[in-house]
Image: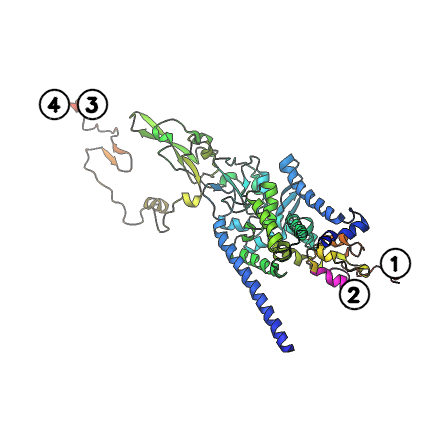
């Protein structure tokens, strides 16, 4: 048991070194903190590069960015948005249509750090039994939040949305927001593994839909090298997306991970000692040529 | 057997579906009930200038805080989790930092969604609330003391706040300088409340729907209708005749007894002493 826990990722570290076995993870953390720092530079140091928060912001007084999910809810309350918000939402929409909606989850969202930590601790503590929701529960929640906006005329979801509450809290003052962070952490740790981001969060659900035809994808283009160590499945926040790409060779499936649920976090790339995965675009279904090694190893 | 298995999976599917649907419906119901309470706005929390009616505002405001950032006086703040104001929405407390009524209204310009109405271009047209001299018992002006601080700080002084002079019955010889708010011009900026010298302000900004009464729609004020129509709309007013001495008139709409100098001298002497002496033998 103990051996198994320490062995997750160990193979990759042995094969590629500590840095390359964590490079995308570290880059993501760097991206998340950099974005937050840009928002914080204004209120803390007085350098106003970005104003606002993750819901809507203004960069260098020219570039508006607005969360399209929030803008959609606002439109559903029968409020006609000003052009600023519409343009902002359109820019964000186009960006994530291109790079994959849930790239937002892995590279921007502050809750990701909380739930990743909970998942890591979950593995370390080897907690076995937790409640499981259906993965599609999030779409139900998404529809519910939209219906609530439509029928109450209020952004009801924004009263509890941990994504914006935490981000806004870090920039404008947290209030009791810390309790929310703790609640999500404990929920993911003890109640349901990967419960929030992977099963319930309607923001993630919205961006999943957005990412259905995204250009930027992870591809298991060297899937013939897979040695079935299962590390990628263990570390992936949405492990169901890997199977068709990695194991679909016999069914003639593309090595590209096409599911909108993939967060493009790159942990599978990091953790694979055999370098099976890489970032690619959705139209490149090519496989790496089987290398000589494989034939050599066999006998 | 195969049939049975299909039935089972179909049932399982339906049960799963129902479970998820019910769970989420429960969540939705809970959230909508919670939202009723969580969106109630305490009377002391004021929205920025140009904010739409509260119900619309809560649908339109995206809670980005750009209005807060562009407020040069740090008046506005965003509600934090646990505050009494709806999560993430901007507000200010007049007694802490009032609105300084910037002529260019940067907070409204910053709003990306129009929750703060971009149609507001003249800050004097803002209606963030209404000042009400809510406690006449403790306002020192009503004790006959000179204060007038609220009047003096009012940015729309003379229109939104005036000083009305009343007789001071306590001393019998002084005036009371009573601040009077006029809703037609008060923007609800809160500078009066902020500067009230009392430990607890006697003049406060109250949400307009709480502060204002409204005359029934069917009410007509006769004198205004008459003025508008240019004459009486019902039976014409009869000229009231008073039993008055010659050349003396009585105006019952304010001027009272009119003793105008006329061609004929009044029936009494112009010397008051003569009048006093009336009936003493002379007449």
**Which residue bears the numbered disc 3?**
B272
Residue placed most toward the observer, B153 or B202: B202
> Is A242 covered by the magenta stretch?
yes
Mark 4 falls within which chain?
A: B
The residue depicted at 48 percent of the width and 52 percent of the height is B36
Residue B67 in the figure: left or right of residue A242: left
Q: Residues within 10 Å of mark 4 (few under 14, many from 20)?
A: few
Mark in front: 4 vs 3: 3
- Separation of residues labelled 2 and 3 (CA atoms): 124 Å
- Separation of residues labelled 1 and 2 (CA atoms): 20 Å
Mark 2 falls within which chain?
A: A
Mark in front: 3 vs 1: 1
**Which residue bears the numbered disc 4?**
B282
Residue placed most toward the observer, B29 or B47: B29
- Is A100 above or below relative to B42? below
> Are the numbered discs 4 and 3 placed on the same chain, yes or no?
yes
Mark 3 falls within which chain?
A: B
Q: Quadrant of residue B172?
A: top left
Residue A160 in the figure: left or right of residue A222: left
The answer to whether mark 4 and mark 3 are in CB contact below 8 A is: no
The residue stretch that appears in magenta:
A240-257
> Are the numbered discs 1 and 2 placed on the same chain, yes or no?
yes
Q: Quadrant of the C terminus of chain A?
A: bottom right
- Separation of residues labelled 4 and 2 (CA atoms): 136 Å
Residue B168 spot, x, y in % from top left: 31, 28
Mark in front: 4 vs 2: 2
């Amino acid at each position: 048991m103990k051996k198994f826990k320490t062995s997750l990722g160990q193979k990759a570290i042995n094969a590629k070194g500590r840095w390359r076995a964590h490079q995308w993870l570290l880059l993501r953390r760097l991206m998340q903190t950099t974005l937050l720092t840009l928002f914080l530079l204004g209120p803390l140091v007085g350098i106003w590069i970005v104003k606002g928060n993750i819901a809507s912001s203004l960069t260098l007084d020219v570039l508006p960015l607005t969360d399209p999910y929030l803008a959609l809810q606002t439109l559903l309350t029968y409020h006609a948005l000003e052009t600023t918000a519409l343009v902002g939402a359109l820019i964000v929409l186009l960006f994530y249509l291109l790079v994959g909606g849930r790239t937002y989850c892995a590279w921007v969202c502050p809750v990701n750090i909380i739930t990743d930590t909970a998942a890591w601790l979950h593995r370390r503590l080897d907690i076995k039994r937790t409640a499981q929701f259906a993965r599609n529960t999030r779409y139900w929640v998404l529809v519910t939040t939209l219906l609530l906006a439509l029928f109450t005329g209020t952004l009801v979801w924004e009263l509890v949305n941990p994504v914006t509450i935490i981000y806004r809290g870090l920039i404008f003052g947290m209030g009791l927001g810390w309790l929310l962070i703790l609640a999500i952490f404990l929920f993911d740790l003890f109640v349901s593994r990967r419960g929030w981001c992977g099963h319930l969060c309607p923001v993630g659900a919205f961006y999943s839909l957005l990412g259905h035809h995204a250009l930027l994808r992870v591809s298991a283009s060297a899937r013939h090298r897979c040695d079935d160590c299962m590390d990628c499945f263990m570390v992936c926040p949405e492990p169901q997306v890997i199977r068709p790409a990695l194991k679909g060779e016999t069914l003639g499936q593309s090595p590209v991970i096409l599911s909108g649920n993939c967060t493009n976090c790159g942990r599978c790339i990091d953790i694979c000692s055999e370098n099976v995965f890489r970032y690619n675009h959705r139209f490149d279904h090519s496989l790496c040529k089987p290398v000589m090694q494989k034939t050599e190893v066999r006998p | 057997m195969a049939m049975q298995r299909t039935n089972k999976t179909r049932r399982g599917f339906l049960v799963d579906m129902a479970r998820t649907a019910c769970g989420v419906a429960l969540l939705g119901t809970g959230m909508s009930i919670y939202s009723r309470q969580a969106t109630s706005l305490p009377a002391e929390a004021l929205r920025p200038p140009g904010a739409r009616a509260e119900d619309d505002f809560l649908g339109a405001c995206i809670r980005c805080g750009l209005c807060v950032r562009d407020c040069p006086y740090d008046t506005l703040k965003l509600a934090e989790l646990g505050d009494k104001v709806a999560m993430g929405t901007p507000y200010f407390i007049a007694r802490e930092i009032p609105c300084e009524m910037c002529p260019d209204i940067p907070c409204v310009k910053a709003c990306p969604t129009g929750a703060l109405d971009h149609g507001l271009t003249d800050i004097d047209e803002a209606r963030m609330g209404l000042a009400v001299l809510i406690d006449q018992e403790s306002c020192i002006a009503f004790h006959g003391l000179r204060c007038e601080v609220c009047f003096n700080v009012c940015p729309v002084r003379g229109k939104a706040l005036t000083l009305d002079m009343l007789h001071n019955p306590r001393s019998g010889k002084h005036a009371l300088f009573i601040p009077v708010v006029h809703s037609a011009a008060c923007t609800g900026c809160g500078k009066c409340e902020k500067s009230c010298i009392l430990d607890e302000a006697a003049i406060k900004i109250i949400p307009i729907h709480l502060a204002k009464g409204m005359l029934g729609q069917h009410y007509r004020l006769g004198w205004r209708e008459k003025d508008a129509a240019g004459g009486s709309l019902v039976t014409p007013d009869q000229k009231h005749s008073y039993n008055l001495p010659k050349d003396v008139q009585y105006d019952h709409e304010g001027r009272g007894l009119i003793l105008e100098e006329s061609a004929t001298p009044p029936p009494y002497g112009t010397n008051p002493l003569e009048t006093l002496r009336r009936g003493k033998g002379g007449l």
